[in-house]
Amino acid sequence: MTDRHKEQDPTTLSEHAKKSLGAYKWNLYDQTLSQLLNFGINILLLRLLSPDDFGVFVIPFAVISFIVLIQDFGYSSLLVFAKKVDKLLINSIFWVNILTSVLIFLGIQLYLITPLSQTNEPLTNQLLFWLSFGVPLSGIYYVPEALLRKKLFFKPLFIVGITAIALSGLAGLLAAYAGWGAQALGIKYVVYLLILAVGYMSQADWKPELQLSFPALKPHWRYHIPLSTEQALNFIHRNIDGVLISKFLGITSAGLYDRAYRILMFPIQQVSGSFARVMLPSLSAINQDPDKVGKYYFFICRMVIFVILPTMILFGFHAETFVLLVFGDQWLEIVPLAQIFAVIAVFQSLGTLSGSIYQAMGVTGLMLKLGAVLKMNSVLAICIGVFYFKSITAVALCYAIASIINSLPHFHFTSKIVNSSFGAFIKNIAPFMWASAPLVVLNIVLPHVVETPILCTVLATILSAVVYMGILSLFFNSKISEIKTLVQQWIQSK
């Protein structure tokens, strides 16, 4: 193992990396505008709905989201990963998704909604009714969305995604304003998937044909079965805390925890998610060269930590001001949760990239084995918080400890896969860790000097940016040059 990837600048690595910049640009547009639009819509929904509305939505949404995730069996990722795909394979995957989604939809109507209609859970029944329509809709859009990603056509993905968020948000807000309560969230979800299904199908240069061959799918089972299993475990791992809190600590606690968790997901989706969506098709094209993949991967890690680490330090110290200004004083109880999740966001933002490495290099079996063990650790930590401490703050703290511990093996194995080492991985991001350290001291001291919370937050933001960039410029100038080069090529990309 060597640290050969540490100082390599992927802006000079290959034409393939440069061609990917256009995809990154449109994906960044997508992530930035969609997250900002989603953020604005959610703020309005927080004003119109109560924590109880969000809390009662947690379990039905988790059930349907899990079903939507596993019904694809990981085949859409296979389309992105595979070097060559023919019409028979594409059509077979599409029709398997359609048949599976229709059967699951009918099963939900018969075995979930019908029994609930005879109990004292009318709201859960109504939510499941709305959400269940997301199952067949997702079955439609999986394949065209994967084909667009495979070709790095992120501009149409951006257009369709923004349109879906805007129109579904409008539908949800109108329903919330009309007094539909938690059902407004279900309507918003279904409208979103409906627009995605129609939009992706219209943008993809492909139309389904009546072809279905199970033998065409069989050779790919070694890839997609571990991947789909890992996706299912990952979903359970990410949602079991909300379900247990809703069941044993109450729907109000679940609503508070869920909103705090969404704050955590914002930077992960905005920064890491933006890179991860493009990484799989980009790295799959060069996966025969682990060294080249490693240089690419280490570079992306540097870009992610460059943004995430100082942002989360700043947010962690000024979470109360942020929550008060954005959500209102009725949500102040989420402040300690948001501060804990700010720490998790740093580790999970880097951990999110690991999945693209496992998939691009075709080692989904390792991803499944490692993930299964580590996720048991997280579930145990969550159960300790729920059943022993019986506090949502304790749940968040236990989850944070487990997440940090779980990140380390992923960093080790992904580095090893690309012919490097864990030590090289740490050295790769160390400059940004050193540059961020003074920000902790700054944000501890500043509130004692400036007592007005809003003014303190504004000054902290400005001073943190100056100190952070100043240290990088003085002691790690090559990192600043690297970022400038990337930005220049990014601007010139199409």
Image: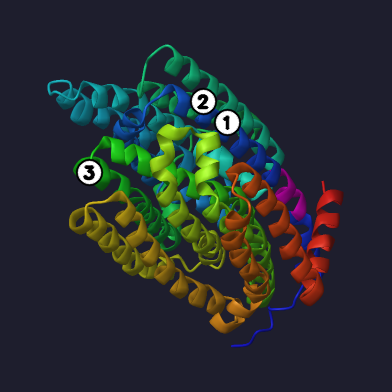
3D distance between C-alphas at marks 1 and 3: 29 Å
Q: Residue furthest top?
A: 178
Q: Quadrant of residue 223?
A: bottom left
Badge 3 crowding class, 10 Å Cα cut-off, few under 14, some 14 to 19, many 20 or more, is some
- Give the left or right position of residue 222, taking residue 107 as reference: right
Circle 1 sits on which residue? 40
Instruction: Give whichever of 400, 8 is nearer the camera.
Output: 400
- Give the left or right position of residue 394, taking residue 347 as reference: left
Give the image location of residue 204, x and y in percent: 64, 35
Asked whether residue 24 is drawn in magenta, I would say: yes
Which badge, 2 or 3, is on the more N-terminal residue? 2
- Give the left or right position of residue 343, taking residue 291 as reference: left
Magenta stretch: dominant SS? helix
3D distance between C-alphas at marks 2 and 3: 26 Å
Question: Which circle marks residue 249 in the picture?
Answer: 3
Residue 54 seen in render: yes
Q: Quadrant of residue 384?
A: bottom left
Verify CB contact (< 8 Å) between mark 1 and mark 2: yes
| Quarter in which the N terminus is drawn | bottom right
Give the image location of residue 197, x and y in percent: 53, 30
Badge 2 crowding class, 10 Å Cα cut-off, few under 14, some 14 to 19, many 20 or more, is some
Which badge, 1 or 3, is on the more N-terminal residue? 1
Q: Which residues are magenta?
A: 21-26
Q: Amino acid at mark 3?
A: Leu
Q: Residue at x 32, y 69 (%)?
A: 373
Q: Amino acid at mark 1?
A: Gly
Q: Amino acid at mark 2?
A: Leu
Q: Is residue 126 above or below residue 269?
A: above
SS at mark 3?
loop
3D distance between C-alphas at marks 1 and 2: 6 Å
Circle 2 sits on which residue? 44
